[in-house]
Image (spheres, helix red, strand yellow):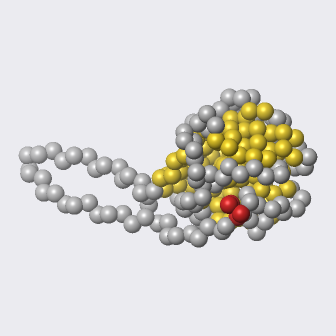
Amino acid sequence: GQVTRQTEATVPPAVLATATLPPVTPTPVAPTATRVPPTATSAPTATPTPVQVYTADFSGAAPDWNQKPDANGRQYVQDSAYHVVVSTTTSWVTWQYPASKPVFKDFTLEVRGRYESGPEVNGYGAIFRYVDDSNFYFLVVTANGKWGFAKRVKGSWTSLVPLTSDSAILKGKAPNTLRVVAKGSNFTFSVNGKQVGTFTDSTHVAGTVGVFTSNDQPGNYHVVYESLRATILLP
């Protein structure tokens, strides 16, 4: 999906379809009871295994991800990474997500990306709880060491955490790993293993995940996404 800051732009058909959200609350399976002899030592209780995981490492052709160029840029897989190139003369944002549209409600999400070229003030990062092109959250970092959090609601943008400097964010072409933990309306954000902030918002309850590129300063802007992994949290 992609839009200008001023007006809606045409979104390629491959990413325009609205996701139909299936039930997202997993039903835990009760463990089978086992009688332990009095003299035996019971094994520790195992940590429940998450029931839904989506991983993209872009090591192959990545057919689940949009690679169709358009008038404002292009996306392609090369060297085990997903490249997003934006080339416009206006302020522009673009987002991509897997065609399979895995749905997550409470989850952890990690996106590893890096700046390649262009204005260092522009952002790159993740979308999550994406319902459709008019409704989702996104978290970004910039190559000059800042992070921010915002949402899109019925096609309108709202900044929730303005771009804020943090020493956890590596500058320039060094890769950054962004992590979101979402539990209900509570969000915890980390970069490279350090917590940079939290936020509470109940606008979007569930949706898919993906990557987000913000070309706030117009020009040729190139970012590289090395991996994405989302895991549902069990109750």
Residue 23 shows in this picture: yes
Q: Is residue 68 left or right of residue 25?
A: right
Residue at the right extreme?
89
Number of labelled discs?
A: 0
> Where, quadrant-wise, is the C terminus in this rendering?
bottom left
* Picture residue at 58% right of the left edge, 36% below the top: 80
> Where, quadrant-wise, is the N terminus in this rendering?
bottom right
**Above or below, comparing residue 94 to residue 202 in the picture:** above
**Above or below, comparing residue 173 to residue 15 in the picture:** above
Residue 223 spot, x, y in % from top left: 72, 38
Question: Residue 188 versus residue 112: which sits nearer the camera?
Answer: 112
Question: Residue 40 versus residue 228: which sits nearer the camera?
Answer: 228
Residue 16 spot, x, y in % from top left: 70, 64
Residue 176 shows in this picture: no
Q: Which quadrant of the view contains residue 12?
A: bottom right
Q: Which quadrant of the view contains residue 82?
A: top right
Residue 208 spot, x, y in % from top left: 59, 59
Question: Residue 2 versus residue 151: which sits nearer the camera?
Answer: 2
* Picture residue at 74% right of the left edge, 65% below the top: 134
* Picture residue at 45% right of the left edge, 56% below the top: 52
Residue 136 spot, x, y in % from top left: 68, 61
Question: Residue 6 versus residue 165: which sits nearer the camera?
Answer: 6
* Picture residue at 43% right of the left edge, 64% below the top: 26
